Amino acid sequence: MLSERMRNVLIVVPMLALLALLSACGGGGGSPGTPGPAPTPPAATTGNLAVVASGLPAGATPSIRVTGPNNYQQDLTGSQTLANLAAGTYSVAAAPVTVGRVVYSPSPATQSAVVTAGGTVSASVSYGSVDVNIALSEVVANLDNPTWLTAPTGDTRLFVLERPGRVRIVENGSTLAIPFLDIGARVFTGGEGGLLSMAFDPQFASNGYFYLYYTDQQQNIVIERFTAGSNPNLADPTSGLVILRVAHPNFTNHFGGQVTFGPDGYLYLGTGDGGGAGDPSGNGQNLNALLGKLLRIDVRGAAPGQPYAIPAGNPYANQPGRRAEIWASGLRNPWRFSFDGSQLYLSDVGQDRREEVNVQGADAAGLNYGWNTMEGTLCYNAATCDRTGLTLPVFEYDHGANDANGCSITGGFVYRGSAIPGLAGRYFYSDYCRGYLKSFLASGGNITEQRDWDIGAIGNVVSFGRDGQGELYLLSSRGSVHKIVRAAP
């Protein structure tokens, strides 16, 4: 038998040989060799945009929208760095902000910022204050139920409609003795009927055309074109061409009343649902009826044999059982609507509870505004209150107890005049029952800067008007016309 010492020697020798072999092969210690090059980090593909807003009082928030590549859109209410943006050009658009009676205007209102991969670019918006006070200045009084005021672009005259059928001219504060046009013999004035609105052709300066919306002696809604005469203050009463006649036989309310040209050059008109309460004939949801609709027609080639054509893009053209003139449906009594650039502001008078304003893109075809399934955002026909496919208003107000907030909205215009820059972009409206003047700012589907302008009592506000310079007016049932002006400090 081997001794203990010999056994240990026999174990250690093979282990030393194994360690020597591993060392020769580079394992288990020794020099690690020369290291290879460090890996290259991946190239940056995105960048950052730092938006800095200043100039607003404590507690006020800016209104900034950033848009860019790949349909990027982000609304900001304060200074913020937007990270990981795709490289490209971004637009930074800031809207005015009202705090109390002071409007803070952004500078610049719009700017571009180029985001580069791996970099950070800054965009600064500085707000400055403009104290806005407005008042009403009476322009003319003692008119016979004024319903509408308009003028050709750039014209200093005011064309004011009187419900019995006269178009009057107000020039330098005086109403001319002879009406521009008098069609009283053919106008029905019962209920809500009468001469209700007027639109000058976009080419009025060269063709002299203008269009009237009125109710005839059979209670039909009529759109008729006339031509200005050789005397610029007198129209040719024999030049009438009926463009469209819509039967309205059963009731003397809900005639609608607005005719205007859209930014696309087509003629739009808003018809009521035929009257009564609750749309008893179901016209609002009937696409084979012209009542309770916003209609769009092409009158550029109007002639006795073919007074209008159907514009390409009308949503129900060439569809059996649907009227090709319809642009939008589901309206109760769209007394007033207006365009502001690419936006449509459409107010619709409610039944018993809600008054509404719909703000949509001017090119949005085939919208259904919900009546008589809905009254604003409230279910009206509760048994079938299915909102599928309906476009609900972006702004509404409840009548309140005893109509404390109003009972019948009088829609107006977005201010784009030059006399009061701080009002730019605000939509003005009133209510027939309360006679107030209010406004709001619509941006990105949101309603902000709601304001009551505290103008005092001027009676029932029947309509707004806009002159050839873009300034706004209110027409009162008392027979007066008031202009919105800048008030003394």
Image (cartoon, helix red, strand yellow):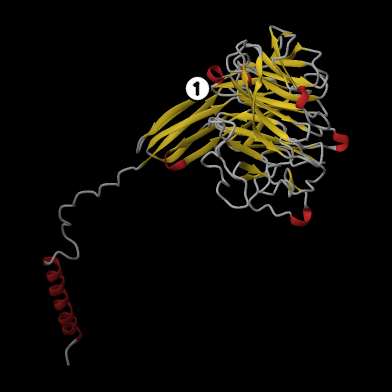
- Give the farthest residue toward the bottom: 1
Residue 122: percent from left, percent from top: 43, 29
Residue 375: percent from left, percent from top: 75, 44
Picture quarter with the C terminus: top right
Of 361 and 92, the residue lying toward us = 361
Can residue 61 be seen by looking at this rendering?
no
Of 232 and 23, the residue lying toward us = 232
Please give the name of the residue rendered at 68% of the width and 17% of the height, measured from the top-left corner: 159
Picture quarter with the N terminus: bottom left
Residue 52: percent from left, percent from top: 50, 28
The residue where tag 1 is placed is: 108
Left or right: residue 76 versus residue 3 is right
Please give the name of the residue rendered at 61% of the width and 41% of the height, measured from the top-left corner: 325
Please give the name of the residue rendered at 58% of the width and 24% of the height, measured from the top-left corner: 201
- Give the farthest residue toward the right: 402
Of 107 and 34, the residue lying toward us = 107
Crowding at mark 1 (Cα within 10 Å: few <14, some 14-19, many 20+) = some
Can residue 71 be seen by looking at this rendering?
yes
State which quadrant residue 187 falls in. top right
